Amino acid sequence: MNAPDPRRPARYSVIGHPVAHSQSPFIHAQFAQQTGQDIAYGRIDCGAQGFEAAVRAFAADGAAGCNVTVPFKFDAAALAAVCTERARLAGAANTLRFDADGWLADNTDGIGLLRDIEFNAGFALAGRRVLLVGAGGAGAGVLGPLLGAGPRELTLVNRTPERAQALVARHAPLAREAGVALRAAALQAPGRAFDLVINASASSLQGASVPVPDDALSGAGLAIDLMYGAAAQGFLDWAARRGARARDGLGMLVEQAAEAFFVWRGVRPDGAPVLQALRARLACA
Ligand code: NAP
């Protein structure tokens, strides 16, 4: 393995398949400029089968770390010598740091979503009723941090119910500790009038309809789709028709990246101006 060359920028990349659409290189370039950190950040499309080989080759070439995207977050956690507690609970990682004494795996999706909800959207989670839709990599990553924010109730639903039940079972001790009523329910019968509905499923990505009944969302509530761009519009329109506030996944995207930057560089960038720049960039695209 080549040691990092201190005369060159520290190298990072997003690795996954596909990655051509990824905004991470733009976001991290903005963070680097803002904080004066000397980094280079690229994209590696590893194809459907080549994830592990691509990560190992990148690390062996002296890179410092990577982000991992769909569908390899579960594989990423398994590759590391050490998982942070939030990556261990999720069983999935979106951030690897190639430490010389063993790779560290972390999952920054949950803290990114929390920052977007509580700080960017100004919506305090304490005491709220929350519906989380989706028990894939994203749902698994955000569940623990959401519990930590102390909602009154958190209901998890998923197209394949067994996955939701397994995640709920794994998080039950944390929920008890945090005093949150955590349960799994059926996708078509989650309960009514939640204060916050988070769509962490791939329904919008696939152009499918909103996967929960209309009355799941309170008209005074907030609804977030982790998807962004045109694909998220159907979900945002659904929330607006309910009279609720609607938010796409761009804020979380920036905030999870800010936390990954902190894991790598020990400096936490300010996400707000980067989110603004990203929205402007996408509006012009
Ligand atoms: P994943 O691991 O592939 O999981 C997909 C999830 O969506 C599973 O729970 C799956 O249910 C469910 N699903 C798929 N199609 C569905 C449909 N038509 N109706 C209802 N549920 C459906 O993907 P992921 O990593 O969790 O990502 C999910 C979404 O979050 C993607 O759109 C991704 O782009 C987005 N995301 C955004 C951010 C961000 O920073 N904004 C970060 C992470 C992910 P089954 O278990 O039944 O298959």
Image: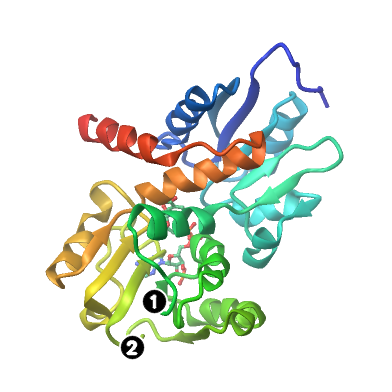
Tell me the SS state at disc 2. loop
Pick the quarter of the image with the N terminus. top right
Question: What residue is shown at x 43% (from left), y 43% (from top)?
Answer: 254
Cβ at disc 2 under 8 Å from ligand 1: no
Up/down of 252 relative to 38, above or below: below
- Against 235, residue 276 (above or below) is above
Total marks placed: 2
Q: Which amino acid, by three-letter code, is at mark 2? A: Gly
- Looking at marks 2 and 1 on the same chain, the residue that comes earlier in the sequence is marked by 1
Q: Tell me whether the residue at label 2 lies in contact with that at label 1, contact meaning CB atoms closer than 8 angstroms.
A: yes
The picture places residue 149, in percent across and down from the top left corner, at 51, 69
Residue 129: x, y in percent?
Answer: 38, 80
Distance of label 2 from label 1 (alpha carbons): 9 Å
**Residue indicated by mark 2:** 191
Q: Position of residue 183 (x, y in %)?
A: 50, 86
Q: How crowded is mark 2: few (under 14 residues within 10 Å), some or many (20 or more)?
A: some
Q: Which quadrant of the view contains residue 57?
A: top right
Residue 262 falls left or right of residue 56? left
Along the viewing direction, whichever of 199 and 52 lies nearer the viewer: 199
* Disc sitting over residue 131 in the figure: 1
Task: In the rendered structure, find residue 118 and report the number of the disc placed on it.
Answer: none
Residue 190 sits in which quadrant? bottom left
- Binning the other alpha carbons within 10 Å of mark 1 as few (below 14), some (14 to 19) or many (20 upward) gives many
Q: What residue type is labelled 1?
A: Leu
Q: Residue at x 16, y 73 (%)?
A: 242
Where does residue 131 sit, x and y in percent of width and height?
39, 76
Question: If the image is split into quadrants, where does the C terminus sit?
Answer: top left
Nearer to me, 91 or 260: 260
Residue located at (81% from left, 23% from top): 3
